[in-house]
Image: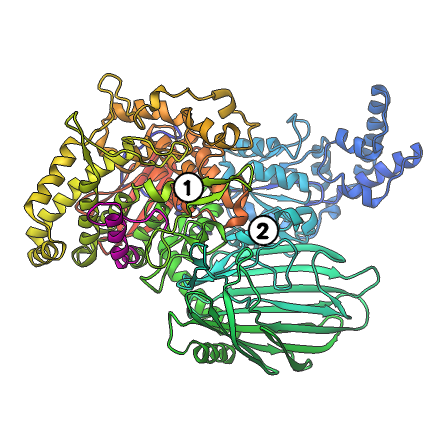
Amino acid sequence: MSGSRAAHSTSTHRWQEDPASAADRPVLRAVVFDLDGVLTDTAEYHYQAWQQLADEEGLAFDREINERLRGVSREQSLDIVLAGRALPATTRKAWLERKNAYYVALLGRLTSADLLPGAQALVTACREAGMATAIASASRNTPTVLAGLGIAELFDAVVDGNSVVRSKPEPDVFLAAAERLGVPAGQCVVLEDAEAGVVGALQAGMWVVGLGPAVRVGRAHARFADLSAVDLATLRDAIAAAAWTVRQHDGSADSVRHQETVFTIGNGHFCVRGSFEEGHPGQAPASFMHGVWDAMPVQVTELAALPAWWGIDLWVDGARLQPHVGMLTGLERQLDLRTGLLTRGFEWTSAPGAPRVAVRFERFVSLDDRHTAAVRVGVTLLSGDSATLRVRAGLNAHVENTGLVHWDLLGQHADGGSANLLTRTRTSGIILGSAAVVQADPALRTGSGDADGQPCVELNGLLQPGRTTMVTKFVAIVSGVDHEDPWAHAQALAGQAAGGGWERLQAASSARWAALWRYADVLVDGAPEAQIALRYNVFQLLIAAPRFTEQASLGAKTLSGFGYRHHVFWDTEIFMLPPFVFSEPQVARNMLMYRWHRLPEARAKAAANGYRGAQFPWESADSGAEVTPTWVPHFANPHELVRIWTGDVEIHITADIAFAVLQYWRVSGDDGFLRAHGAELVLDGARFWASAAHLEADGRYHYRDVIGPDEYHERVDDNAYTNYFARWHLQQAAALLDWLAEHAPADAARLRTHLQLDDDETDRWRDVADRVLLPVDPDTDLLEQFEGYLQLTDVDLPTLRSPARTTSMQQRLGIEGCARTQHLKQPDVLMLAYLLPDVLTARQHQVNYDYYDPRTDHEHGSSLGPSISAVLACRAGRPDLGYAHFLRAARADLLDVRHNAGDGIHGASAGGLWQAAVFGFVGLRVRDDGTVTCDPMLPDAWQGVRLRCRVHGRDHLVEVARSSGGVSATVTVE
Ligand code: BGC
Ligand code: BGC
């Protein structure tokens, strides 16, 4: 049975069963064809039949209205044709029959000559390759049509309007086809020409290829004009590429900031949001670079948005290209996750009668040279004999961070080929050199512009029909944090990039990406949405994690937006670090080193609170001092301020960092790091826990006035997560001292001296660990989240689980109101159960899961929750429930399910998604001796998973596959 827990075995995996697909390609076993508009053009006959009926009845109808009937059922088609006019039921029926009679009469004339070009060859090729074939059509005349065309015997299954009740856009026809073929939905590819069909096939969880224009089938995973040039190899390539592609085809203005976040690209040093080259009202354009921190008086520290380097302004016949002005059609934006290349193409005209142009922008941030990026645009004239083109490509220092200006202008110059800018952050004094070299068609006349803060290259020329005019901009940005003479260096790098050219720069970057993906990719068989979302979320972490420095970490919103001002929370160590620990350990190490370098500030924070050791800040920026804002505007009324206590009392982060250090060490086997740096982090953190514990009259140690992971409840006593983690941290520290004494006595001695650790102190560690209050009820095995939690008003389940709810429970009940109830913003006791499974008994796991999971605001609480709930559901033996949580995390940014993706990527959700797949569904574990094991629990849709990881310096290939015998896993040391 699907979802059943499988034994760890060594069976062979199934990827080879599909010989034509290379190992990293989606497995495709069946092709499901829509009929009308895909294999034949009965759409034309439908049109003629409707037109005849409409003419006879005096209804307005033409080819344009007919477009809307594609893929739609008869009944719905009639509604469209009637355009609101009511008809008695009997007349309706009679009209439908008449239209059908006209249609069937026309069908009688069908022969194989009516097959669309390429159709039969593709069906035949699929069959010869061993793939199953099916028809999924809304038409009730399918048998007649297939017979007329003479291709009925080419299909293993035919599902049509006669066999299913709910027509497209419901997924029923497709699901029925897959079932008849005996092929899992996610291994089917559907060919569709109608929007309703594309939507239905996506809902069915299949790969979808659209045939037709983007406005109609742009939602599909891939798109062709028709089948005339599509052979099986092309089809497979398109799906393979689609599995690495995030697409947008709808440019509606209300999602502009969301899409801007989604299309963030970068290289582990700097990132740029998907802000348009030509600008757009309502966007929040920004590019951020590690290390470029600034603080303004009264404001907390944040990364200063870099001077805008990606801009290219265009004028066609004097009209400035602005996507929201004039008429824009055929928008297709896509991000290639394999290479980080972002492209955006569309057609545009400024006004009726003005020249129409096709415009295509491309950009990437080089993974090969961390300071470099490139942008280019191609403009093609589509109407008229010629049009003037003016291009302005430069740099712009007039940028802001949500109203705050961080830059002073120090210098600028521009000439016909380049633009250069020197700026300095206002408070931190960081120098930034930016340089752009512009290359263009020799036919364009070049000049320059030097408006204050906006040096640029200006180009002027003529567009001619059928010729694409290209302008390419090579950019380098260097900060004084990374180089002594950042401006000269930036100019040299931009010149070098331009000298090598676009192709070379891109090839070098793509080669680096390929090397990264070898370890970072998680291949999922049978679940298109999950596959793309996993790659996307990992991509967002890969572009933002500090690849080149140990003086930076990964903010809660990565480098993709203004949210949380790039501050580093526990999100980094607990949620985002694990994918790096397993795939790119040196980057994980950089992030841990960021903490180590900031030990002095953590010690200062502990001392200021009257504690010893190192207490890490809840929010951390450049120095490592606490940067949590103390007051923020109330969510309901921005004129009212709310006191934020997290920076004062959300102390669990110190243990979370120790957890990450030890996880990194256990998986990487990097003893050198542990001895030189990691141990100090763990030991000095333990010292904080020992000193912050209060021994009270009950003979127990307490931690009072804290905030646990569930921030719906603030300033509580004896939070279970905090107290259990304090104990764990103290125990680990004691064990670490023993390990050091045995394996690295010199380091043990050095650390004891350096930290002035004596036996009295380590005795106290043990005492606190032994006697810290652990709030577990011995009768029920329930851990009380904090003292008094179980006495609070119970949750309002009908509201909590209502699909109609669109706001968080805290927004509904108010901050205090919510705190008086048991509603949880995110797992707390269960977060403990997730991270430290061994501290709970099997019964405690079950009892606490059953109690706390239903009380959690999975839908609108913290975005950190769903991925963890996914793993916990797997552990509870319910992978399909886990999958519902997984999809919620998968959609956090791509579909903006929380309506705040415009502020930046939900980094913790991204890292959590990886954990849900790898620790949840794959069930990957690393034993203390470095052995990798799997205990898989796949959701029904998933047919297999494959990933590589590095454990103790060795490459492991992990493969999980479902077969008739169940789910099996193999781990191969490569
Ligand atoms: C969550 C915290 C998280 C923070 C930053 C809050 O909403 O409750 O757990 O650290 O966001 O992502
Ligand atoms: C988060 C806290 C954070 C605070 C200030 C809140 O929304 O839940 O974790 O410290 O914002 O940034």
Asked if labels 2 and 1 touch by Cβ distance under 8 angstroms, the answer is no
Whole-percent x and y of residue 850?
Answer: 35, 23
Question: Which mark, residue 805?
Answer: none
| Residue displayed at 30% across by 44% down | 653
Residue labelled with disc 1: 644
- Using the image, determine if residue 141 lies above or below residue 295: above
Q: Quadrant of the N terminus?
A: top left
Q: Nearer the viewer, residue 846 or 222?
A: 846
Which image quadrant shows ligand 1?
A: top left
Q: Pick whichever, 229 or 624, lies toward us.
A: 624
Q: Considering only order in the chain, which callout, 2 or 1, is on the residue closer to the N terminus?
A: 2
In percent of width and height, residue 169 lies at: 65, 35
Say few, some or many: other residues with alpha carbon within 10 Å of mark 2 (under 14 / 14 to 19 / 20 or more). many
Which residue in the protein does label 2 denote?
257
Stretch in magenta: 592-619
Relative to 22, residue 526 above or below? above
Q: What amino acid is at disc 1?
A: Ile
Q: Position of residue 887 (x, y in %)?
A: 47, 38
At label 1, counting other C-alpha atoms closer than 10 Å, the crowd grade (few under 14, some 14-19, many 20 or more) is some
Q: Where 440 sits versus 871, above or below?
A: below
Q: Quadrant of residue 440?
A: bottom right
Give the distance between the C-alpha atoms of the residues marked 1 and 2, in whole angstroms.
27 Å
Q: Residue at x 30, y 41 (%)?
A: 651
